[in-house]
Image (cartoon, coloured by chain):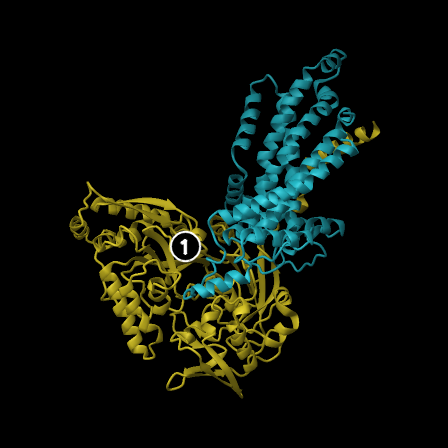
Amino acid sequence: MPSSKLSRRTLLQLAGAAALPVSTSLMPRPASAAPSTLTIAYNVNLPSFDPTVGLSAVNPTIQSIYQAIFDPYIGQAPDLSFKPGLLTKWDWNEDRSKIVLEVRKGATWHDGSPVTPEDVVWSLQRAADPKSGNPIQFVWAKIGNYKIDGSTITADVVEFEPVLFKWMAFLTGYVMPKAYYEKVGAEGFEKAPIGSGPYMVEAFERNAYLKLKAHPGYWGPKPAFESVVFKFVTDATSRVAEVESGGSDLTLEMPYEEFDRLKAKPGLAGSSIPVSDIAMIFLTDIDPMLDSNVRLAANHAIDKNAIVERLLKGYGVPIATLEAPGYAAFDPSIKVAYDPELAKSLLAKSGYSPEKPVKFTIQTTRGFKPKDYEMIQAIVGMWRKVGIEANIEIYEVAKHFELRAGHKLAPAAFYNWGNAIGDPSTSTGFAMFGPSPHCAWKGKDTIERIGPLWGEKDEAKRIAGWKAVDKYIAEQGEVIPLLQYVQPVVYKQGLKVVLQANGMVLPQLISPA
Amino acid sequence: MRAGEIFKRLVLVPPTLIGVAVIVFALLRIVPGDPIAMMIPPGATPLDIERLRALYGLDRAIPEQFVIWFGQMLGGDFGRSISLRQPVAELVLARLPATLELALLAAVIATAIGLVVAMIGVQLRGRRAEWAVDAGIGVLLAVPDFLWALMLLLAFGVLLPLLPISGRIDPRLDVHFHSNFYLIESLLTGRFDIAAAILRHMILPALALALPFAALVARLLKAQLAEAEDQDYAQIARARGFSRAAILRREAFPNALIPTVALGGVQLTLLLGGTVLVERVFSYEGIGNMAIDAVINRDFPLIQGLVLTFAVLFIALNLAVDVLVTTLDPRLGHG
């Protein structure tokens, strides 16, 4: 049949055409990055441009991108201290029943219109609206009844929240453009977002890249790079290849072995600092963790220094509480010694020994954080020597969240805990306060100790109170803090990179050396 | 394939898709991982969690959720992505062309390599060198596509940095497209420099996808060619003085092609499935890459939309292969 013959011929022609050698016109041309462009191989995708609602709003890793486009109410310096953002002043009144905010004059949105106090109030009211989908709504709802007088905003405190201003520098704490958002709506904003930050969105290809250009009307220091490209390269091997091949100028979050190798390579440099993210093991208040001897033995049997040195190649800081160095309530006097003999004697009091070990399950992720599974393997080995036999169960981080929210974690469960604002309420507080959905240990004593601190208006007293809670928790062994993570960043030589202790890599802080 | 048979196959498509929809919907809610649990910020109370759950409609009973989702889907509304906060249909349709172009290029490369290797292999039949071809095919087949992806990435991205290793197009290029079929559009509009730039980005991921499939094509075709070469008609042609190459090209190849397309065509679905990991390695913005993020974020509506999209693609691909085989072999068209 003619059609049949035609098909065969066509197929053969197609096959022949496909077999042709690749034309020289398809051969690569040398990359020629414009010197005013900074290309970052970034480790996560950007799901949404609205930094105040949905899943991405509470993803700490995405905040670097948000802070390039949007201004937080209050800024944060590299050392976790706070500095003016779109608010130049912020304070409580004397009895802490009101707050007073001073809005920066002269700031503009990316469309050239001025940032107004109305924008700030609208942003705060929208964030407090339960229908907005802001996951931190419960914080923003603690203030209301706003009044604007010139550039000054006053508001009533509905419920005292000691870390309200710290939240203004973190998750969902961004000022959004009222008039523009109301004009274009939520979907229009996703397609053409504007902020008041140092960079404005030029092009966006979902799952591929985000191209930014400098905001000419930015109120702060002019960024060194006119253009910034965030390439979304979620695979660590691919990110390493990106910076090694010269396809990107900077990348982050890679295995420490790779970090050491890359920073020793000619043409590349590396920096690393401890960031506000810790590794820890949740203990759940079920058997056998109800036995304080078991809990304390599990704590004292772990050689955290060995884990940092041998597994993490020195990139980590051992910790004794959920407060890492640099956090507001860090207390270096609280120590949990590595003492396997003490661990053995504690276990012996409860009738356990290496021959007759106490048995339980420890859950961990594998590959979610650097060496997470390997760390737990090492810990299980250390425990075995003193009389603890732990069975490792691997789960996905999504399952961890679900189990933790339902108070169904195993007796021990590995996790990491970020705390970019460095406040004890957002580390020890939420991780160890029984009613919190994040808490695995629902001990009554700890709840009673923490309870009054939520409303404590005397800051010095509040911090002292949290230190006392941390000491109590360490003495009771209600959680196993392991180490503070170190974030590795690799970049082309000739760049000056300022790293932030909150883990953000901000393009506006990167410049030619 | 006759029109009647095509119609019969098409009639089976809706129940198949409904089955897929039911399974994926139920599975997502049975397996661990709750999108709301992933969204809970520090300090949220049980009431806050309930509020979030209600906001995304996850507070309703599972059958009720299914009825709502399915009803909306019949009206063309596949729901809104939880993580990306946009309509699922819009998101999938925006990214699907990238995957289709990649899979198409991979299929072309695989066919070309498979044809060449099979022809060489059969020419060397019976000689010692044949084992080298067979061993080569074995290696190509044994290494999965994502490992090829990593090896190609290191080879041509790092050791010999000749080709781009991430994305679909250079972000520095200031180009605009009317459709999401970037490669096809740039070719059709004569923007060959742009097409070349896109191809440079596609070559490595397409090759990673193509290599195992090329081995499959080569193995199938080589076996079929060898079998055809032993048939009476080939022997007669040889007795009449035709060269071996001519016999292979004119007699054996057309006959070997039909079973190769029939068997290899079905395996094309594996190539499509391979895009998930390969797109991830090369940060290529197709639906495969999007699927991984959707799973990580437990974005139920997006996962459902993507699974249904893959199901439609698989069904369409199988149907297309059947039609192609029938076209190549008219005997099948007559039942």
Q: Is residue A346 above or below residue A180?
A: above
Residue drawn at 75 percent across, 22 percent down: B250
- Tell me if B182 is positioned left or right of A483 in this view: right
- Tell me if B312 is positioned left or right of B140 in this view: right
- Tell me if A115 is positioned left or right of A334 in this view: right
- What hue represents chain A? yellow
Q: Is residue A420 above or below residue B78?
A: below
Q: Nearer the viewer, residue A196 or B10?
A: B10
- Tell me if B143 is positioned left or right of A429 in this view: right
User: Judging from the image, what secondary structure is the residue with disc 1 in?
Assistant: helix
**Can see residue A220?**
yes
Q: Nearer the viewer, residue A29 or B172?
A: B172
Q: Is residue A223 above or below residue B33?
A: below
Q: How many badges with numbers are in the image?
A: 1
Q: In the image, residue A139 lies at what x, y percent?
A: 45, 72
Q: Nearer the viewer, residue A185 or B212?
A: A185
* Quarter holding residue B315: top right
Residue receiving disc 1: A263
Q: In the image, residue A461 lies at what x, y percent?
A: 28, 77
- What hue represents chain B? cyan
Q: In the image, residue A215 lies at what x, y percent?
A: 58, 72
Q: Which chain is disc 1 placed on?
A: A
- Report the amino acid beneath label 1: Lys
Q: Quadrant of the C terminus of chain B?
A: top right
Q: Quadrant of the N terminus of chain B?
A: top right
